[in-house]
Image (cartoon, rainbow, N blue to C red):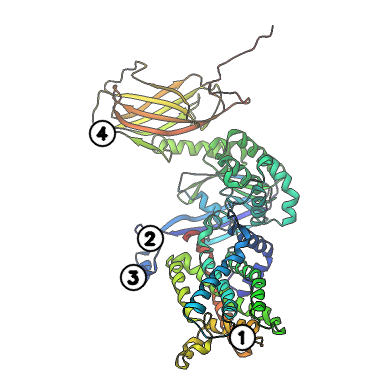
Amino acid sequence: MGDKNAIEVEGLVKNFRRVNIKGGYTSLKSVLLNPFAQYRKEGERVLKVLRGLDFHARQGEMVGLIGRNGSGKSTLLKIMAGIYKRTSGTVRLNGRVSALIELGAGFHPEFTGRENIFLYGIILGLSKAEVKKKFDQIVAFAELADYIDSPVRTYSSGMYVRLGFSVAVNVDPEILLIDEVMAVGDVGFRRKCEQKILEFKKEGRTMVLVSHDLDEVAQFCDRVTWLNQGVIQEDGPPSQVVETYRRFITGQDGVRFRDGSDRWGDGRIKLTGIELLDKDGHSRGTFRSGEPLRVVLAYAMSKPTEDVAFGVSLTKADGTHVFGTNTHLDGLALEELPESGRVELVLERQDLTNGLYHVDAAVHSRAGEPYDYWTKATSFTVRSDLEYDGIYRPPHTWKRP
Amino acid sequence: MSNPIDHITELVRFRNLVGHLVAKELKVRYRGSVLGFMWTFLNPLMLLSVYALVFSVYMRIDMPGYAAFMFTGLLPWIWVQQSLIYGTNSITESESLVTKVTFPLQVMPTVKVAAALINYLLGLPVLFFFLIVKGVDLSLNLLYLPLVLAVAWIFVWGLALLLATANVFFRDVQYIMANLLTLWFFVTPILYPLEQVPPAYRVFIKLNPLTLLMAAFQDIFFYGRPPQVGGLVVLALIGLAVALVGMVVFDRYKESFAEMV
């Protein structure tokens, strides 16, 4: 790691104009009728996303950016990438920058993979000769040799993302800004991305990784910066910052919420959070196959209710239902529950195969009438060294004749 | 960066990208259609047939070689029209590039104007064929074409930059432009020669910069005479003014594009 800074951000402030709820876009009519509307109520219309932030990365360093949604991580990344304009402060980047914000942005669906590689490569700043030189490498990395002359509209979303990633990392960036892109794609692809990142680290490239996967951050980064409401809350060694951050989010509202959930029920009892813990009680998003898994449900009761059952069900990302149970089925008595509290389901071993699993959580009457049914309340990834078929990996051995 | 010279240097620096995007633009337009690239020629020909039917059969305009005259102006008009329509939408339509990729945005309007220009150049053989069939003598004055195109480019390109910027903030611009262009087409002497306009109204027609431009095209192709220097100079000055304003406005606002698109 060099001692020169590759990224220097000082006193960075970013305000967004809050977009009008009614119109979405300003129309000419609204401006003509009310030309000064946008200057009125200035204070209310401005969203302060970054509030005077200092951030730096040394050459060859990999820095993780963590924080809750809306804390300003992506905004910081987009300002460093030159996509958003800063409101004030200074931003200096020394070296060729490549930003992985959305993979394959700029692909044209009617064009073949080959044409898109050239187009995207040139958009990202390569010359035609450079793309030509790296073409085989890009195709091999994306594993698309058989499809390279088909239009990308015929690609699966996984193929699309693989191609986008492959071009972007082959641009030879000195500074790589990564926004959560490794969360897409299957486990095999994810592993390839990780290998590529390790390779980049060895080559001394500077990287900034925005991620919600705290294990990933802790595993790869040399340093972690935690953003909270537009300022740096903590900055330091990964394990330490990740740990404080975990304690912060679990302490703050009991258990964490995930976005994009879908829920129904009459709400007399509400699930206020769900958390997945390992055997030591640490919140995790990734588990090794066979590890214990504890599902913690936090609830709050608005009306005293006696007829209560809590349920948890696991579904693999492809829709295969893996396991489901509830407290009634397992014969757990739940009379005289406190008004709020936590219920925990302990799986001594989850012998699952590689992949992404969704967790549905529910609180309902013993007959199944829903109070709060929360589909995809959270999800987790299982990793194992071997790619087994199916969903279940019982402990097993072979015996030869 | 709000210096017009920087704007141009940046464009030159990214000429590779511009070239590639122009090629993409041309390739993609007719991809998926059976006749493909042939549409580059078929489109203006069909438009020409429509106007030829209306104006030399139904509402006879008395003028020798009318169809050739009309085609001479129609082709550059299509260039202007495509440049302005596609140019207006150039930023708003490339949302994913604007918000997800570090990208020199000023290439977008330029790409649209350049692609439309190439379309025009591809239409030229058809025009020559037409002129020859209609017995119009081609003269050496055709050598003025690059000059005329250069002057026209400055004007059209500057306008496209301005419109592209305006459309990011007011989506109304694209709809207004679509209608305004129809009006502009009919008040510009393309379907009729300037002499057909009653003298009292010619002043208004002459206030239109495109009148000067069309006159230049008609001079060198149809009448076989050099373009009027005065007209070209005036057009160039208007064009430079528009282009300067266009570049300054575009650069002033381009950093907000990602938040507005």
Q: Which residue is mark 3?
A: A34
Residue B1 figure quarter: bottom right
The three-letter code of the residue at mark 1 reads Leu
Q: Which residue is mark 1?
A: B232
- Point out residue A295 in the picture as x, y percentages from the top left corner: 43, 26
Using a 10 Å C-alpha cutoff, classify the residue at mark 3 as few (fewer than 14 neighbours), some (14 to 19) or many (20 or more): few
Q: Are marks 1 and 3 in contact (CB under 8 Å)?
A: no
- Point out residue B139 in the picture as x, y percentages from the top left corner: 70, 84
Nearer to the camera, A137 or B6? A137
Task: Please determine whether, in this image, residue A335 is positioned above or below residue B147.
Answer: above
- SS class, disc 3: loop
Nearer to the camera, A309 or A236? A309
Residue B210 figure quarter: bottom right
Residues tagged by mark 1 and mark 4 found on one chain of the structure? no
Mark 1 to mark 4 CA distance (whole Å): 80 Å
The three-letter code of the residue at mark 4 reads Ser
Q: Are marks 2 and 3 in contact (CB under 8 Å)?
A: no
Residues tagged by mark 1 and mark 3 found on one chain of the structure? no
Please state the chain letter of the residue tagged with numbered disc 1 in the rendered image: B
Q: Which mark is residue A302?
A: 4
Q: Which residue is mark 2?
A: A45
Mark 1 to mark 3 CA distance (whole Å): 41 Å
- SS class, disc 1: helix
Please state the chain letter of the residue tagged with numbered disc 4 in the rendered image: A
- Point out residue A343 in the picture as x, y percentages from the top left corner: 37, 25
Residue mark closest to the camera, 3 vs 4: 3
A298 sits left or right of B74 in the view? left
Residue at left 68%, top 65%?
B15
Task: Please determine whether, in this image, residue B129 is positioned above or below residue A41.
Answer: below
Q: Are marks 2 and 4 in contact (CB under 8 Å)?
A: no
